[in-house]
Image (cartoon, grey):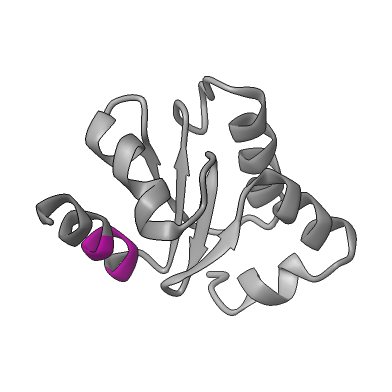
């Protein structure tokens, strides 16, 4: 499918990518807002995709990722998870290890 190739290219071309509702300055859901705040805590560069602007990605990324919800954080071509997983990794001091190698 063409959309799967588009998603794969986005993930492959961006070391850290967050699929979210809205954007980091104006998140459009509470979970996206909280996920962005956690990522910004680490002062790292990341790419985001507003799935509200791209209905095809919003529809097919859950199938591609086998993960039903947003936000979705991908690091180095690997799905880390949604907000609950980010929070748990952050709280347990493990997210920094996942993100640290990408810090500029």
Residue 84, image x and y in percent? 74, 47
Residue 91, image x and y in percent? 88, 56
Direction from residue 4 to residue 47 in the image, left or right: right
Over which residues does the magenta segment extend? 8-12
Task: Identify the residue at image location x=61%, y=40%.
Answer: 36
Task: Identify the residue at image location x=52%, y=26%.
Answer: 25
Considering the whole magenta stretch, tell me its main secondary structure: helix
Residue in the foreground of this view, choosing between 70 and 76: 70
Task: Identify the residue at image location x=49%, y=61%.
Answer: 74
The quadrant holding residue 19 is: top left
* Magenta run includes residue 99: no
Residue 59, image x and y in percent? 32, 37
With respect to residue 30, does 85 lie above or below?
Answer: below
Quadrant where the N terminus is found in the figure? bottom left
Residue in the foreground of this view, choosing between 9 and 63: 63
Direction from residue 27 to residue 64 in the image, left or right: left
With respect to residue 11, does 32 lie above or below?
Answer: above
Which residue, as the protein is rendered here, is positioned at the far left?
2
Which residue, as the protein is rendered here, is positioned at the far right?
92
Task: Identify the residue at image location x=46%, y=57%.
Answer: 66
* Magenta run includes residue 11: yes
Residue 18, image x and y in percent? 47, 49
Residue in the foreground of this view, choosing between 78 and 23: 78
């Amino acid at each position: 499918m063409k959309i799967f190739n588009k998603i794969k290219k986005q993930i492959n071309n961006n070391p850290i990518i967050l699929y979210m509702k809205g954007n980091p300055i104006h998140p459009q859901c509470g979970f996206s807002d909280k996920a962005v705040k956690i990522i910004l805590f680490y002062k790292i560069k990341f790419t985001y995709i507003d799935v509200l602007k791209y209905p095809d990605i919003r529809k097919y990324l859950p199938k591609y990722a086998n993960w039903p919800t947003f936000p979705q954080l991908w690091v180095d071509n690997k799905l880390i998870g949604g907000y609950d997983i980010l929070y748990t990794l952050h709280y347990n001091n493990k997210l920094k290890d996942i993100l640290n190698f990408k810090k500029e």
